[in-house]
Amino acid sequence: MYISTRDNFQAVTATEAIKLGMVPTGGLFVPQNMSTFAEEELKSLIGKTYQDVAAKVLAFYLDDYSAAEIVTCLKKAYQDNFTHQEIAPLYRLADSTYILELWHGPTAAFKDMALQLMPHLLSLALQKLEVREEMVILVATSGDTGKAALEGFKDVSGLKIVCFYPYQGVSAIQERQMITTEGENTYVVGVRGNFDDCQNTVKTLFGDQAFRSFLAEKGFVLSSANSINWGRLLPQIVYYVYAYLNLVHKGRIKYGEKINFVVPTGNFGNILAAWYAYRMGLPLHKLICASNENKVLTDFFRTGIYEKNRPFKQTNSPSMDILISSNLERFLYEMTGREGTAIATWMSELQEKGRFVVDKTVQKAMSEILWAGFATEKETLATIKETYLKSSYLLDTHTAVGMKVYQQYVVETGDKTVTVLDSTASPFKFVASVLQAFDGSDASIEGDEFALLQELSQKSGWSVHPTLQGLEKKPILHQRICAKERIRNELENILGLR
Ligand SMILES: *Cc1c(COP(=O)(O)O)cnc(C)c1O
């Protein structure tokens, strides 16, 4: 069963939690019972395929799905839509440093790992719960989630997907990927505002009972594909377990040896999935939380003060330009020993005053497993260049933030534990910035980001990610733009309610 982080809702089944997306009264669903791997259970997965490991991990959390149903969903999710047979392969960068490549899916970023699976889990949930309304998936995206969600949900019957992104706040390639999406049930809206504006409005709509009843009367029910949905988070636990087993299988570590993961972080979903893997018994030493200059999390983990009142900065790692990290709520719930009332208080303080403060006990609990740091835009570019010159390996800007923070971590702690860095996007997805790392000049100013793909390919000897080839020739199918105050109106237009 799944319970609310704010102790304000009854326990629900996995299907209901996935259908609802977030707790209707505010809060996020978390598993009530945290089971752990029996030792032989984890060991028995060494050498197994990604899909096999996934079946095992998912079974822990999806009581009301049968084993056969889970396998069916996995077969649809992870097949030749990924361009690497291992789905999430490891690259050995140095003796004790590995890169976990999470961008071999159909949109070239790690969000595919979850979003190729989640629609199938959701669609099954709707069948099981005999939902008659048409489901409307609302997505607020800082760039990558949007396309990944659109790809995952397009042409799935019984639902529409509506995706809001900050207009001119994402890369030209990200925007083109979204506005060329096919499918009868896909809608894309550019919002004049930043990601937090998009996400806050979407959250407010979810929390608005009157609006939800109005929609229900018209035959619609809302859900979310953001990482606040448990169905989004769950598939991400899998690659942490898989990466660990892969290292054991290849003889790089001994079974039981602890490793670190470095995670370029925005909404705190990806790193939280690593924590769940840890909680299930995966032998981990430290989770390294890497932020860009919107370093609200770094400051929080270092001081215990979450301070959202600060200038929002558009950086060269845009998918991490976030000042409200939604999934932190789940982590805090666990770190306080499940004090739902404390969480409710902090979250309303965050909503009203833009800040909250946790006590020393919570801070200490967090620092036992987590280390946090940030990298500037300049450091990010320097790290891309340095890594390429040294190892011929091309990092994207988000992954480079992770690399830089990992280097800081090693200097500060001297820790030599084997470490895996999550690579969250193909370098071609953020081509202008990656080229800037080599040339020094801002290539995006010159306009044609698509010509830059070839340029980067020639310079690096890497081939352009298959999904980005020929993108500029695809017809533009979505042209909606709205003011941030008019998101709700736009949604009503789309649903034919105005
Ligand atoms: C979404 C995203 C992130 C941040 O992940 P969170 O789960 O939001 O912390 C990092 N890098 C890339 C490329 C992303 O798309």
Image (cartoon, rainbow, N blue to C red):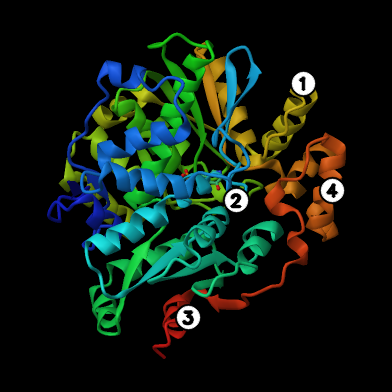
Distance Cα–Cα, label 1 vs label 4: 22 Å
Where 136 falls versus 232 (above or below)? below
Contact, mark 1 vs mark 2 (Cβ under 8 Å): no
Q: Tell me the distance, in whole angstroms, between the alpha carbons under discs 1 and 3.
A: 49 Å
Which numbered disc, 3 or 4, marks the residue closer to the eye? 4
- In primary-sequence order, the first of circles 1 and 2 is 2
Tell which tag, 2 or 3, sits nearer the viewer: 2
Quadrant holding the C terminus: bottom left
Q: Residue at x 65, y 68 (%)?
A: 180
Residue positioned 66% across, 40% down in the render: 397
Q: Earlier in the sequence, mark 1 or mark 4?
A: 1
Q: Mark 3 points at which residue?
A: 490
Query: Of the residues under marks 1 and 3, which one precedes in the sequence?
Result: 1
Up-down: is 93 above or below 13? above
**Lateral position of residue 326 relative to residue 348, left or right:** right
Q: Which element carries disc 1, helix, strand or loop?
A: helix
**Image coords of residue 339 (percent x, y):** 17, 41
Percent x, y of residue 172: 71, 60
The amino acid marked with disc number 4 is Gln
For discs 1 and 2, the disc positioned in front in the rendered view:
2
Pointer 4 and pointer 2: residues touching (CB < 8 Å)?
Answer: no
